[in-house]
Amino acid sequence: MIKVSQPFLNEIETNNILDALSTGAISGFFGTYITKFENDFAKFCGVEHGIAVTSGTTALHLAMIVLDIKEGDEVIVPTYTNMASFFAVMYQGATPVAVDIEKDTWNMDVSKIEPLINKNTKAIMPVHIFGHSVDMDPLLELARKYNLAVVEDCAQAHGAEYKGRRVGSMGDIGCFSFYANKIITTGEGGMLVTNNAEYAERAKSVKCLAFGDKNKFMHKELGYNYRMTNLQAAIGCAQLNKIDEIIQRKRMIASWYTELLKGSDLLTLPVEREGYKNMYWMYHIVLSEKCSLSRAEVMDQLHKQGVETREGFVPYNQQEALVVDCSAAGFEVANYIGAQSFYLPSGPELTRDDVETVCKKLLTIIS
């Protein structure tokens, strides 16, 4: 089976973990790897502060907390994303407001944001989906015009660039995931990055139960246990040392796929706009209306032939457990992409032969 993704691990991670174990530094309270990972990853993103947490979801939740997002507030989020983006808003009792996506990048359609802004709107959450940055300049202009915070969901886009700027460095806060299938991993884990010292200090406090200064157990506010362990950070440091190699591999794999699949009018492939740098977290494709087979049929046949795939996200506006009105109006692009998309094996250890095998099987199935 050619897997969708596998982590890019070797003896470097093993040595770091053994080093942390030898000193007994296994918790999230102390250990040199935590500080090093936070500082080095912040530098990689081009920001001043990094706060390591338990997941990308908790990083997003922490961002909502430090921005004082609360009940009655609204946050604009692209409807086509992992639902963690929406959950983080909902955890605070606030209301996520969905916006449709672009046909080519599958990112939020910035041109549709302004009509959604009202007196309750407090923030915009651009999600850099599958490794391609959102069109940030007009989004940031809107944020300035209406005095809105910007929280970048960078869970799938470590190292992605927009006009020479790394994602996570353009908004007020950037949030990353280090889940096992992400560009770099700590198994589970995440990071909040920011240039705002006040946000950073509050995030550090709240992620650690908001312990008191003079009396540890006189808590400053409602806190959470969102600490990344030193063991996880040890893996993160090893991963960060080879992130350039991983990115190079991911982009090479994507170039192979594009070369081999671009001739088919039955598929829509990922793009890389001029001035952007796509990380191709997953090589996400969409079946065109010309394809006679359903997505489920294509994926099932690929699986039977030894190729693992994953379907695209179900848009927020179709999440029956989360919203009352699940109508399609206003979300035509996301609804189509959500129904017809899936991603191909994209792990950094794939070879050219692996990609050729996947493409040959896929094209044979859909033709």
Image (cartoon, rainbow, N blue to C red):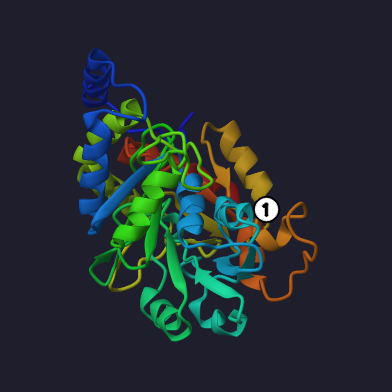
Residue projecting furthest to the right: 324
Q: Nearer the viewer, residue 246 or 134?
A: 134
- Residue 255 pos. (x, y %): 32, 54
The residue carrying mark 1 is 293
Q: Secondary structure at mark 1?
A: loop
- Residue 313 pos. (x, y %): 60, 53
**In-image side of 151 versus 32 (left or right):** right
Residue at x-position 36% and y-position 37%: 185
- Residue 356 pos. (x, y %): 39, 43
Residue type highlighted by circle 1: Leu
Is 18 located above or below residue 130 in the figure? above
Q: Nearer the viewer, residue 307 or 40?
A: 40
Residue at x-position 49% and y-position 67%: 107
Is 324 located above or below residue 40 in the figure? below
Q: Quadrant of residue 303?
A: top right
Q: Nearer the viewer, residue 255 or 230?
A: 230
Q: How many marks?
A: 1
**In-image side of 315 versus 325 (left or right):** left
**Mark 1 neighbour class, 10 Å CA radius: few under 14, some 14 to 19, many 20 or more:** some
Residue at x-position 23% and y-position 24%: 16
